[in-house]
Amino acid sequence: MKLELTQFFTYCIMMTPLVLLSTLLIPAAWWEKNPRKASQLGAFLGKLSFLFMVIASFGLGIKGVLRADLMKWGPFAWTVYFDTLTAIIGTLVGFLSWMILHFSKNYLEGDPGHGRFTRWLCFTSGSTLMAVVSGNLGLFALSLCSMSIGLHQLLMFYPKRSAAVISARKKFMISRLGDLCMIGALAVSYFNLGTWNYQELLSLTNRPENTFSFNIIALLLVGTALLKSAQFPFHSWLPDTLETPTPVSALMHAGIINMGGYLIVRLNPIVSLSPTALGILVILGGFTALFASLVMLSHASVKRSLAFSTVAQMGFMMLQCGLGAYSLAILHIVAHSLYKAHAFLSSGSLDEMRKSSWIPRELPHAHPGAVFLSLGGSIAGMIIAVGITGISPIDEPGGVILTGVFLMAIAHLLWGLWSRTLSAKIIALGALLSLALAILYLGLHAGIHFLLGGITGELSNAASESLSWMSVLILVLFAGVFLIQIELPAWRVHPYCHAAYVHARNGFYFNTIANRVIQKIWPLKKLNQQEK
């Protein structure tokens, strides 16, 4: 009976991506001729996939970690691996896929390509779920590649729009670079270690003779993650994909873009062995977060501001991974995905988009007293919260820098509240808000660490020492962005600051350079002839 129950839950895990991938078995002509039925079928399959994921998560509580090799060809195996990390990310992706497919039923009503759009949306969502539940590096790489191909079809939904084609081609080429890194990791794993299975790979990490191989694998995995997650300087494709229908933006910003971070967390014991790989994550992730934040603050376009917000959030998530705060990185993925999916799917309301985009409000010039009061209030709230809960976030990897950034975020919120008036009622409200947010932060921190404590590894002493100076530098740079954000309305009138503001609003021209390179490699001659 126990074996049968285990098999039942294993089949539920397997069916989670397969019900969506099965849409490829239906002829393309049917999707084209029956767009309304196709959209209803897509929404139903999305709901069914999510239901299988919920049942599988229920099975995790009963049976514990579930793993099964369904088919095997040499090192490649169709392996499903279901633990707490899989359940969290799988439930998130499954829920968002269901909601996006349901939203799409009416979004493209009457469009001749509605059926084709639903088909590729199902395929892309299914590929993402297959990557999440896979327990084999080869299957993950195959899922990642198929997910990219499906996304390319969605980005090319309007093939006569030049901007859509350029962004799709740019994403396609950057993804192929990521695939090359992944193929390199597969080659090193197979020829040096003889396996692609997650559990077997992780069991070999404690052998000194494998240190060099794991260092190479870690660097290649980090390269894959950075390329797939729109990190600087390969970020420009993401803000340029706004020509695609809104459901694609929601799926891309809330689900697909997270797969790089998921890969790092899933194989974090391997990545943690390489101080160089961690350093790259910290430097590029931190720089991407700072760079995209500056560009985001200068944008008047709400959707582009949302897009650069995603780039910044992914950069911060990579920074968390580089600091060894893997649990917080997963918490960040969940929170950002839900927020960004709502932001895009509610984009019919300009007011809601304005609130979601984090465009800075026209507040008065920040008085130094208000700035120091805001910082002091956020620090005091955190100290009191630590005393109440007994939870100290600075004891965790990366705790000092991540808590410092969180305190700056609270300080910015308090400054926005206290900059207009400092009445006793407003000061008390801000103090209570600071305390409540600090308690929420500590509670979520403790909760996610409890759930994932057995999954995430620890940094080596060499890695911890090499990251200490980087943490101080990153914290200082985030403080600089905090200062720019609160002083932006006043500084923008200065000639030099105004010039910098214009450059930032144009993304410091990295998008323009990337577009010219893509058009040199992959010209738009055929497209131009069609448009004429």
Image (cartoon, rainbow, N blue to C red):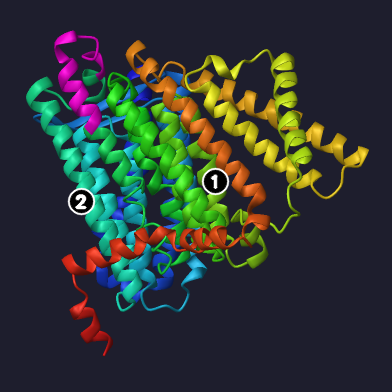
Residue lying furthest front: 495
Badge 2 marks a residue whose secondary structure is helix
Q: In front: 531, or 379?
A: 379
Q: Residue at coordinates 36% horizontally, 69% vertically from top-left?
A: 115
Bounds of the magenta segment: 202-219
Q: Residue at coordinates 58% horizontally, 37% vertically from top-left?
A: 479
* Residue 209 is covered by the magenta coloring: yes
The image quadrant of residue 215 is top left
Residue for badge 2: 176
How far from the left and from the top, in percent, is residue 458? 39, 15
Residue for badge 1: 338
Give the vertical position of 79 relative to 41 (above or below): above
Q: Is residue 352 left or right of residue 450?
A: right
How far from the left and from the top, in percent, is residue 301? 54, 66
* Residue 130 is covered by the magenta coloring: no
Q: Quadrant of the C terminus?
A: bottom left
Residue 172 visible in the shown view? yes
Task: Give the residue type that dot 1 points to.
Answer: Leu
Q: Residue at coordinates 26% horizontally, 40% vertically from top-left?
A: 224
Local packing at callout 1 (Cα closer than 10 Å; few below 14, some 14-19, many 20+) is some
Q: Is residue 103 left or right of residue 27?
A: right
Q: In front: 49, or 366?
A: 366
Nearer to us: label 2 or label 1: 2
Local packing at callout 2 (Cα closer than 10 Å; few below 14, some 14-19, many 20+) is some
Task: Give the residue type that dot 2 points to.
Answer: Arg
Alpha-carbon span between mark 2 and mark 1? 28 Å
Residue 52 visible in the shown view? no
The image quadrant of residue 29 is bottom left
Q: Residue at coordinates 9% horizontally, 22% vertically from top-left?
A: 192
Residue lying furthest bottom: 532
How far from the left and from the top, in percent, is residue 214? 20, 22
